Image (tube, helix red, strand yellow):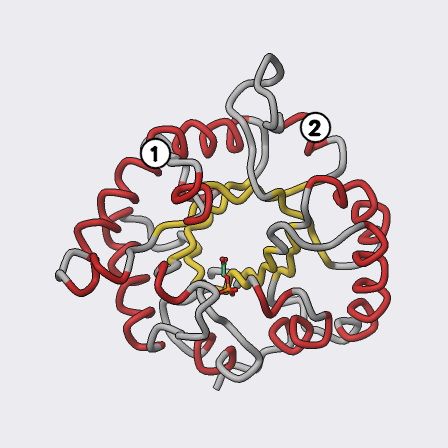
C-alpha cells in the first residue's frame, strides 16, 4: 500500500516570522486530517530551525529543498545531511527544475545528492519532468526516462519519492491533464520496476484540482509550490478527498 505524500515547497519564500504565522493558521486546519497521508513542508534553510520547533507534536514533517553529497567541507552555499538531521528533517527535494535550469544541475549531481540523502537516512524527493519544447517535439517520455535512469541509479525505491513535474506546468497555472499526469507516473513506476514506489505529481496543484489528481491510480501525492504559501489553500490540499 502506497501512502500518499502531500508536500509543500516554499522555495525562496517565508521568513521565520511568516512561517510562525502560517503555522498558527495551518495546524488547526489539519487537526482532523486522516492519517492515511503524510503531510510535509519544505521551508527555506533559514526557517528550518523555527519550523522544527513548531511541528513538534503535529503530524507535519519537514523536508529540505536540497542536500549535498559530502558530510562537510568547502562547499559554499550547500547544506550537509547532518545539518538537516539535527532539525529532524525527514525528506530532501533534489533535482527540482529550478536548480536544473538556473544552476545547470546534471542528472549525475542529482544522483549524488539523492544517494547521500538515502545513505544518511533522509528520503529524497527526486524531481523529473520535460519542458514545453520537449513535449511539443514528442520527446517527453525519452527525457523523463533518462532523468529517471540516471537520477535514480543505485537508489533504494523503498526509501524514495519521485515527483513528476512537467516544467511547463510549474508556476504557470497550466496543470497537466490528470489522465496524462497519471499515464506518465505509471510509466515511471514501470521503468523503475517497483510497484511500491511513491510518485507525486507537481505543477500548478491547487485546491480546485487536488481531488481529481488524487483520484488517479498512479498519483501518490503532490508537490505544491505557489498554493503551499497560503496556509488555507495548502490545508485544503492536505484535506483532499479523492473521488
Ligand atoms: P507550483 O510549483 O505548484 O507553483 O506550480 C510546483 C513546484 O515547483 O514544485
Label 1 C-beta lies within 8 Å of the nearest ligand 1 atom:
no
- Residue ID at (60%, 13%): 73
**In this picture, residue 48 sits left or right of residue 64:** right
Can you give x and y, in whole percent of width and height, for residue 170 in the image? Answer: 44, 63
Would you identify the image quadrant in which residue 14 lies?
A: bottom right
Residue lying at 65% horizontally and 78% vertically, measured from the top left: 236
Vertical position of residue 220 compared to residue 110: above or below: below
Residue behind mark 1: 106
> Which of the 4 image quadrants contains residue 133?
bottom left
Q: Which residue is label 2 attached to?
A: 83
Separation (CA) of disc 2 from disc 1: 24 Å
Near mark 2 (Cα within 10 A), the count class, few <14, some 14-19 or many ≥20, is some
Numbered label attached to residue 9 = none
**Taking 1 as reference, is 64 left or right?**
right
User: In this view, which residue lies farthest toward the top?
Assistant: 73
Residue 112: where, in percent of width, then height?
42, 27
Image coordinates of residue 115 in percent, x first then y, are: 45, 29
Residue reaching furthest left? 138
Amino acid at each position: 500500500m502506497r501512502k500518499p505524500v502531500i508536500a509543500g515547497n516554499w522555495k525562496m519564500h517565508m521568513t521565520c516570522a511568516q512561517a510562525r504565522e502560517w503555522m498558527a493558521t495551518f495546524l488547526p486546519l489539519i487537526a482532523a486530517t486522516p492519517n492515511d497521508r503524510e503531510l510535509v513542508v519544505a521551508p527555506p534553510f533559514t526557517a528550518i530551525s523555527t519550523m522544527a520547533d513548531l511541528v513538534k507534536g503535529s503530524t507535519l514533517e519537514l523536508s529540505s529543498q536540497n542536500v549535498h553529497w559530502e558530510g562537510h567541507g568547502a562547499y559554499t552555499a550547500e547544506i550537509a545531511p547532518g545539518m538537516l538531521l539535527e532539525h529532524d528533517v525527514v525528506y530532501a527535494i533534489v533535482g527540482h527544475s529550478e536548480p536544473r535550469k538556473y544552476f545547470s544541475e546534471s542528472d549525475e549531481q542529482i544522483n549524488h545528492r539523492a544517494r547521500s540523502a538515502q545513505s544518511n537516512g533522509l528520503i529524497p524527493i527526486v524531481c523529473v519532468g520535460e519542458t514545453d519544447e520537449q513535449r511539443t517535439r514528442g520527446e517527453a517520455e525519452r527525457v523523463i526516462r533518462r532523468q529517471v535512469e540516471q537520477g535514480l541509479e543505485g537508489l533504494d525505491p523503498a526509501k524514495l519519492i519521485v515527483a513528476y513535474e512537467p516544467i511547463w506546468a510549474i508556476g504557470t497555472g497550466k496543470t497537466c491533464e490528470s489522465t496524462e499526469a497519471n499515464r506518465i507516473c505509471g510509466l515511471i513506476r514501470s521503468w523503475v520496476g517497483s510497484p511500491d514506489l511513491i510518485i507525486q505529481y507537481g505543477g500548478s496543484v491547487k485546491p480546485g484540482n487536488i481531488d481529481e489528481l488524487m483520484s488517479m491510480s498512479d498519483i501518490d501525492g503532490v508537490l505544491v509550490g505557489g498554493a503551499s504559501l497560503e496556509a488555507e489553500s495548502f490545508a485544503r490540499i492536505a484535506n483532499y478527498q479523492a473521488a
